[in-house]
Amino acid sequence: WTSAVDPTLQAQIGGFYGTIVKSSFVDWMTEYDTIGIAGQDGQPGSNQHIGRGTYVGSFTITPANASTSLQDTDISTELVAQIQSGALPPPALDEAGNVNSLYMFDFPSGYAINDGGGNSCVDFDGYHNSIAIGGADVPYAVHVDCGDTFEIKTLVHSHELAEAMTDTE
């Protein structure tokens, strides 16, 4: 989210994601597979299989909304606009047409974000959500710079990665 994101994070987060999506961390997430499992409501499961992935790359966006005080809806609106403009790649789909991509947003320090239930750096350092694009739920995660070390930031990133993979919404 702008070129003002922490330079250490910018330099190192690609290596972190490139490693974690191909690691035993993701293998562990298969316990959340739903293939052949009915939902708690008795409806069919999502037939979700969680497997190792690919880190596509890092992209710096110039958001149309230049405010440093944002709501989650501002972020989801920007995600749609950035995909439609070609600044971000469109979500990949699996053979069944399900979204197989996750967009991770990092914000520079000084941003205040409200996720609809709390405020950044007070109630959370990150969260995940999804937005419908073309009839498909596209997941994204938000990571706010609360002054933490790179090690703490990767804890937040791995937490949101796991939650977004196992429960997109």
Image (tube, helix red, strand yellow):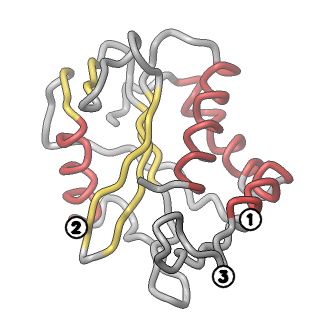
Q: Residue placed at 26% from the left, 77% from the top?
A: 135
- Please rate how many residues cluster around mark 1, counting C-alpha atoms within 10 Å: few if below 14, some from 14 to 19, many from 20: some
Q: Is residue 114 positioned above or below 45 on the image?
A: above
Q: Residue placed at 64% from the left, 75% from the top?
A: 37
x and y percent of residue 32 in the render? 68, 60
Q: Which mark is residue 84?
A: 2
Q: Amino acid at mark 2?
A: Gln
Q: Secondary structure at mark 2?
A: helix
Q: Which mark is residue 153?
A: none
First in residue order: circle 3 vs circle 1: 3
Q: Amino acid at mark 3?
A: Gly
Q: Which mark is residue 36?
A: 3
Q: Secondary structure at mark 3?
A: loop
- Please rate how many residues cluster around mark 3, counting C-alpha atoms within 10 Å: few if below 14, some from 14 to 19, many from 20: few
Q: Nearer the viewer, mark 3 or mark 2?
A: 3
Q: Which residue is mark 1?
A: 52
- Please rate how many residues cluster around mark 2, counting C-alpha atoms within 10 Å: few if below 14, some from 14 to 19, many from 20: few
x and y percent of residue 10 in the render? 54, 33
Q: Are marks 3 and 2 in contact (CB under 8 Å)?
A: no
Quadrant of residue 74 in the image? Answer: top left
**The one of 142 and 41 positioned closer to us in this rendering:** 41
Q: Quadrant of the N terminus?
A: top left
